[in-house]
Amino acid sequence: MDLLLWITIGFIIIGFVVLTSMKKGMESKVAFIKANMEEEENSSKAKSVIWWIWSTTAWGIVSIFLVVWCFHNHFG
């Protein structure tokens, strides 16, 4: 197996582990924001949830790109 395939597999597995480990914390932040709508602390918690969503989206896009690139190099 070549280096690109190992990078792709490692990126997907490590990213999945990191995102799933952070999921519980994000769920509790969203629950806190819903329960306490008027508090000042919600702004920083909301920003961290939004950044987590953006990073999850970026991880997914890069993962798809890497998988397509691997298939292109192996079968193209």
Image (tube, helix red, strand yellow):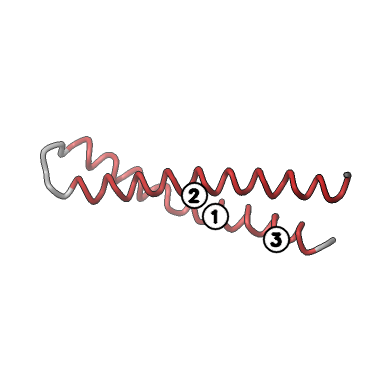
Farthest residue to the right: give it.
75
Of labels 2 and 3, earlier in sequence is 3
- Type of the residue with mark 1: Val
Which mark, residue 17?
1
- Percent x, y for residue 19? 49, 51
Residue 31's spot in the image, x, y percent?
27, 39
Horizontally, residue 41 falls left or right of residue 14, namely left
At 50% from the left edge and 43% from the top edge, which residue is drawn?
57
Q: Residues within 10 Å of mark 1 (few under 14, many from 20)?
A: few
Question: Tag 1's secondary structure?
Answer: helix
Give yes or no for contact between labels 2 and 3 (Cβ–Cβ under 8 Å). no
Calculate the distance from the C-alpha at mark 2 to the C-alpha at mark 3: 20 Å
Check disc 2 and report its element: helix, strand or loop: helix
| Residue 16 in the image, given as x and y percentages of width and height | 56, 51
Residue occupied by mark 2:
20
39 left or right, relative to 48: left
Front residue of 76 and 49: 76
Q: Position of residue 23 (x, y in %)?
A: 42, 47
Q: Quadrant of residue 17?
A: bottom right
Q: Give the residue type at disc 2.
A: Thr
- Identity of the residue drawn at 15% across and 36% down: 37
Q: Which mark is residue 7?
A: 3
| CB contact under 8 Å: marks 2 and 1 | yes
Nearer to us in this view, 31 or 9: 9
Bin the neighbour count of mark 3 within 10 Å (Cα to Cα): few under 14, some 14-19, many 20 and up: few
Between discs 1 and 3, the one toward the N terminus? 3
Residue shown at the point (38%, 49%) measured from the top left: 51
Which corner quadrant holds the C terminus?
Answer: top right
In the shown orientation, is residue 5 left or right of residue 39?
Answer: right
Mark 2 packing: few (<14 Cα in 10 Å), some, or many (20+)? few
